[in-house]
Image (tube, rainbow, N blue to C red):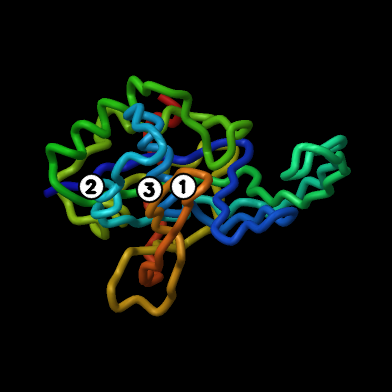
Amino acid sequence: MGTLLLRCVGPMQSWGSRSRFQERDTEREPTKSGIVGLLCAALGRERGEPLDDLNALRFGVRVDREGILDRDYHTTLRVINAEQKKHSTQLSNRYYLADAAFLVGLEGERALLERLQAALQDPVWPLYLGRKSFVPGCPLSLLRDGLVEQSLEDALRDQPSIAPPELRQKTTEKMRILLEDPHGEERRQDVAVDFRHASRAFYTRQVSTRWVTAPGPREETCT
């Protein structure tokens, strides 16, 4: 067993879990389904392929920098309806996080984690932070110590801060950690059963929130 660490740092990120039609939400930190989708892109796994091995990984997130919640108002012209006959104008609100920094952890069997780490360093398809226009500002894989022989909670607690210097919150004394926990106080519906559009489905998981002393910065940032 071990823990694979990923850094999600970029100008914009969006991790929706309840989006419906014209309202595209984002959670305040990466969702499990969003990270699993990202791993599928790295592996070259097609929509509709089984997700059981990735969903079985225990998932956690440390918030190194809380993002600024913002909204884009979109107008899309000449949208064709389901009958392929009429056109309409669609208005939508799309929420995102600006200047956020998250350390994501995945705990599980080392052989699978090694495959995932290799895929993140040489992905089959491009990787995005929740939406196709939101590219990472740093490589997702921590090259030096991205795969550690620690529990998920210990790895997230001990790893130096991954926030770039210009985004680092120097006054922050505590960092928020969200851990997958069968006895957690919060329920989130962000575990993907199927990514195919016609049969997309999700189920819930329990999450607990912990607070840890903010660690010092990494010696290197986006390398």
In the picture shown, does residue 221 fall above or below 13?
A: above
Q: Relative to residue 171, is residue 75 depicted above or below? A: above
Question: Residue at point 63% right, 31% down?
Answer: 133
Marking on residue 176 = none
Q: Is residue 36 left or right of residue 198?
A: left
Instruction: Please tell me whether mark 2 sits on a helix, a strand or a loop.
Output: helix
Mark 2: few/some/many CA within 10 Å (<14, 14-19, 20+): few
Type of the residue with mark 2: Asp
Residue 31: percent from the left, percent from the top?
Answer: 46, 54
Q: Name the residue under label 1.
A: 34
| Residue at 18%, 39% in the rendered image | 112
Q: Is residue 40 left or right of residue 70?
A: left
Image location (x, y in percent) of residue 34: 46, 47
Disc 3 to disc 1, C-alpha distance: 11 Å
**Residue ID for mark 3:** 104
Picture coordinates of residue 139, whole percent (x, y): 43, 28
Residue occupied by mark 2: 53
- Amino acid carrying label 3: it is Val
- Mark 3 or mark 1, earlier in chain: 1
* x and y percentages locating residue 192 in the rendered image: 40, 53
Of labels 2 and 1, the one closer to you: 2
Asked whether 47 or 136 is in front, the reply is 47
> As rendered, which of 85 and 196 lies closer to the eye?
85
Q: Quadrant of the C terminus?
A: top left
